[in-house]
Amino acid sequence: MRPLPKLSFPRRVRAAFSLLELLVSMGLLSVIVLALFSMFDQTQKALHTAIAQTDVMEPGRAAMDLLTRDLERGRATRFAGVTNLLIKRRDRNGPYFIPGVLDAYHRDSALHELFYVSPLKGLQWTAQGWFVADDVDPSQPPDSTRLGSLYRFESTNVAVLRGTKVTNDFNRQWIEFTRRSTNAPQFGRFIDGVVFFRATAFSANGLPLDSWVFPKDIPSGVVITNLSSSVSLTGFTNQALPMALEVEFGVLPPKLLTQYRALPSGNPVNAASFRSNFFVKYRGDVQVFRQRISLSSAIQ
């Protein structure tokens, strides 16, 4: 019997990855995807941070530029009994005031009001001012959340530097500044979330003219007085003006402002604790704007 011949089949070569190779490739691909996602996430965060800073910086710079231009137009009336520039400092003693959060001295208690006059044409003069008040109603102080809005005042009364009623004309402008009313056209809201607003006048020798550091030699026409334990004034009358005025204010970014306003406000003790912890955590995020403005028309 003849043996059966061996059948030969064509050898088929099949190329394929092993399980180990698939696991290694999937691992490398996962690392690459995670790295790309992390890069994209960081880029998004940087973009959102830049947008938030822009939202704060633009109105802050606009307010500082306008305030600088206003003060550079300011002049001394050289008229007895007329106040050329007035800084009113008011410390925060409310139930929600948190001392020692920013710098425990100047900025914590800085809720200043700035008032000054400038010429229009001929013998006509107008008045401007800046202050911090409630977000909605400029006639009310900053609410219990400790934050407010920065307002600009533009007088609707024109004072005429002539005759016997000069002092009355300028007094009407000051009264208009202090007796603020809701939706009044002379008050414009510029920035929300203002933590502090400070104005400091300086004499020719560079010393501050305020009640924090009472100078020994007060220039003629300068009045520095304490109205109470928490309110003080620095006024410039007749031909007096400060050689320079330093203006500074701090603004909380919009995102943090929204979070801050969402904090509980029912129990005063708990509310103060929440706000204190919030400011301690995010005080480094407060955007500070500061400018020292030289007044060319200063006398002393």
Image (cartoon, rainbow, N blue to C red):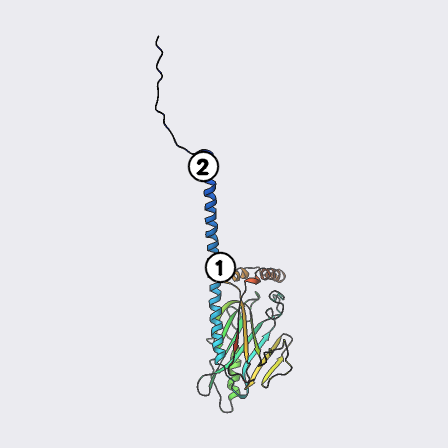
Numbered label attached to residue 205: none
Q: Is mark 1 on a helix, strand or loop?
A: helix
Q: Quadrant of the C terminus?
A: bottom right
| Quadrant in the rendering for residue 240 | bottom right
Q: In this view, does 194 lie above or below 214?
A: above
Q: Which of marks 2 and 1 is nearer the N terminus?
A: 2
Q: Where is residue 188 in the image (x, y as percent from the top left)?
A: 47, 73
Please name the amino acid that badge 2 sits on. Leu
Question: In the picture, residue 93 is in which quadrant?
Answer: bottom right
Q: Do the residues labelled 2 and 1 touch (CB within 8 Å)?
A: no
Residue at point 47% right, 42% down? 28
Residue 183 seen anywhere in this rendered image of the structure:
no
Neighbourhood count class around disc 1 (C-alpha, 10 Å): few under 14, some 14–19, many 20 upward:
some
Number of the label disc, if any, that sits on residue 22: 2
Residue 179 locus on image (x, y percent): 53, 77
Q: Nearer the viewer, residue 101 or 23?
A: 23
**Three-letter amino acid code at disc 1?**
Thr
Marks 2 and 1, how far apart in space? 40 Å
Q: Residues within 10 Å of mark 2 (few under 14, many from 20)?
A: few
In-image side of 192 versus 109 (left or right) = left
The location of residue 289, given as percent across then percent down, is: 52, 69
Quarter of the picture containing the N terminus is top left
- Tell me, yes or no, if residue 259 can be seen here: yes
Of tags 2 and 1, the one toward the viewer is: 2
Q: In this view, does 92 lie above or below 256?
A: below
Residue visible at 54% across and 78% down in the picture: 244
Q: Which residue in the structure is indicated by mark 1?
A: 49
Question: Percent from the top left, x then y, of residue 141?
Answer: 56, 71
Q: In this view, does 246 lie above or below 45?
A: below
Q: Is residue 214 left or right of residue 159?
A: right
- In terms of image quadrants, where is residue 214? bottom right
Q: What element carries label 2?
A: helix
